[in-house]
Amino acid sequence: MKEALLELREKALEELKSLRSAEELELFRVKYLGRKGLLSKYMAQLSTLPPDEKRVVGKLANEIKVELTRGLEEACRGVLQYAPTKVSPVMDVSLPGHMPPRGRTHPLVQTIQEIKEIFGRMGFQVVSGPEVELEYFNFEALNIPPDHPSRDDFDTFYVSDDILLRSQTSTVQIRVMQKQKPPIRIIAPGKVFRPDTVDARHSFMFHQIEGLMVEEGVNFGHLKGVLSLFARTYFGPDTRMRLRPSFFPFTEPSAEVEISCSLCKGKGCSVCGGSGWLEILGAGMVHPNVFKAVGYDPEQYTGFAFGMGVERIAMLKYGIDDIRLFFENDVRFLSQF
């Protein structure tokens, strides 16, 4: 068997010199080094040899396998170097590359970050609270009576009799005031949930930012000044703002805050309904009953609160006419921001 292996070695090395293509290299590998190749057949017969001869022949077979493997690798490199078109095309480094698509910050996240930055420069801290909330924080502590329509099952996602998905981030101001004494300046961004039918203007889930400022001597003028500065900073220096009387159970007096339409500059168009004004948020002075619920003396402290829908703010700034675009994950839409 030793002589047969040496003869196989000489024959294989001779064949290696004549290989010129990838196909020929593969046939050589299968013929000599494959699982059913010639070398494997000889090695399978080692068990039939006497121990002394088995040791010598086994060592020789392994040496031949290593030698043929190395010779095959060198032959492969030669074929790849001198005949690349027969194996694989060579990379043309002068061609432009294919850049993978890059992700972007979601427009709602961008809007929240911008609002946080604006109020942060005015001394407001960012706080958060649970999305699954007790009815007490969502309604009772906010001076919303039991017979108020918003407390009905068809206006709120109830988990149990007194647990619900929060319908406003105003719940956070109650939790903050329960834990600390004035002065307080906070904004609370987060998700809120209401069982609204999804259409171009409504969604069962959206984002809201609640703001609260409580100190001694805070008045309605401070509220107007803070919101006016926000409007001009976010929507542009030429933006005008006005307050229209309204009603909210947790503020008194209350107001709807409107800004001049950025498209028609207050002249009236289809976006603003011809009025020249666009509503952006609700605000007002914190109701004394809310202060009493958290243990504040309404004779000592005053404050204001406001709440804005993030989607609405973004839609007004960027001229978006359908809230569903924010949640459909259409790259053609999201890549614009």
Image: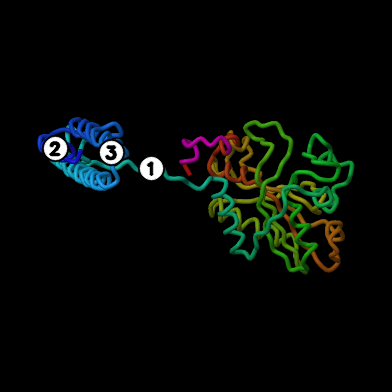
Q: Secondary structure at mark 1?
A: loop
Amino acid tagged 2: Glu
Whether the magenta-drawn stretch holds residue 87 is answered as no
Q: Secondary structure at mark 2?
A: helix
1 or 2: tag closer to the N-terminus: 2
Residue 7's disc is 2
Amino acid tagged 1: Pro
Tag 1 residue: 100
- How much space separates mark 1 and mark 2, taking CA atoms? 55 Å
**What residue lies at 63% left-to-right and 56% top-to-bottom?**
228
Choose between 216 and 42: the one closer to the eye: 42
**What residue lies at 64% left-to-right and 35% top-to-bottom?**
201
Q: Bounds of the magenta span?
A: 327-335
- For disc 3, the neighbor class at 10 Å (few under 14, some 14 to 19, many from 20) is some
Q: Secondary structure at mark 3?
A: helix
Tag 3 residue: 43
**Percent position of residue 195, x then y:** 74, 35
Amino acid tagged 3: Met
Rendered position, 26 above or below 224: above
Decide if residue 122 is on the left or right side of residue 61.
Answer: right
Which tag is nearer the camera, tag 1 or tag 2? 2
